[in-house]
Amino acid sequence: AQKITQTQPGMFVQEKEAVTLDCTYDTSDPSYGLFWYKQPSSGEMIFLIYQGSYDQQNATEGRYSLNFQKARKSANLVISASQLGDSAMYFCAMRAGGAAGNKLTFGGGTRVLVKP
Amino acid sequence: ETGVTQTPRHLVMGMTNKKSLKCEQHLGHNAMYWYKQSAKKPLELMFVYNFKEQTENNSVPSRFSPECPNSSHLFLHLHTLQPEDSALYLCASSHTDLSYGYTFGSGTRLTVV
């Protein structure tokens, strides 16, 4: 079975500093996709970044980058130059085929609070 | 606007009421999903539809009844709910390809009184 683990339930970060959100995953399928979503207090889930299991380079999207370490099965999100608007819940998710049935599985989330 | 529209955004209903949540997408996606998000709990996948056919029901009580009339619309019919059903209900859609994530709606915040 596939599983996503986010070990940091919550964290504070100073405005303008970088923050790393941890994510480890487990799957027996060689082909999978890793995703990060942001959920502000309003509730919508906003897609941030994607990393494919066969991608050789780490994904980047503006201030977001994904530190993909395949052998360690980790996919940490790095947010650079934090802004007050980055305060939200962040979810790591994985989509794999095979027995996982192609569904998106979510971690428990990390709440980030950016301090001015 | 995310491409997936959910209505209503907020809903308060009594335990004897019948109401429906609506989800609509015009992204050309062929799969649609209902999720439940309760306070301090992980996201729970409730139902999965692929090409209008229900392919997954994760032991959801029968007081929740999904309907997918076409690949662009998804409903969640609610009747005789319990206070513990109060939660944020999120609809999502996707392509079946693994490289695509899900596109979510803004959710319906449901309160059962």
Image (cartoon, coloured by chain):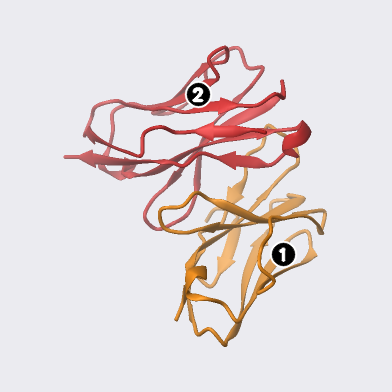
Q: Is residue B24 left or right of residue A115?
A: right
Q: Position of residue B86 (x, y in %)?
A: 48, 69
- What chain is tagged by disc 2? A
Q: Position of residue A42 (x, y in %)?
A: 40, 58
Q: Which chain is red?
A: A
Say which quarter of the image contains residue B48.
Answer: bottom right
Image point (57%, 12%), residue name = A71
Residue closest to the far bottom: B16
B11 vs A92: above or below:
below
Colour in which chain B is shown? orange
- What chain is tagged by disc 1? B
Image point (68%, 69%), residue name = B75
Disc 2 to disc 1, C-alpha distance: 33 Å
Number of other residues with Cα within 10 Å of mark 2, as a class: few under 14, some 14 to 19, many 20 or more: many
Q: Position of residue A4 (x, y in %)?
A: 54, 33
Task: Report which residue position mark 1 lands on.
Answer: B73
Marks 2 and 1 belong to one chain: no
Task: Report which residue position mark 2 lands on.
Answer: A75
Image point (50%, 24%), residue name = A75
Res A55 visible: yes
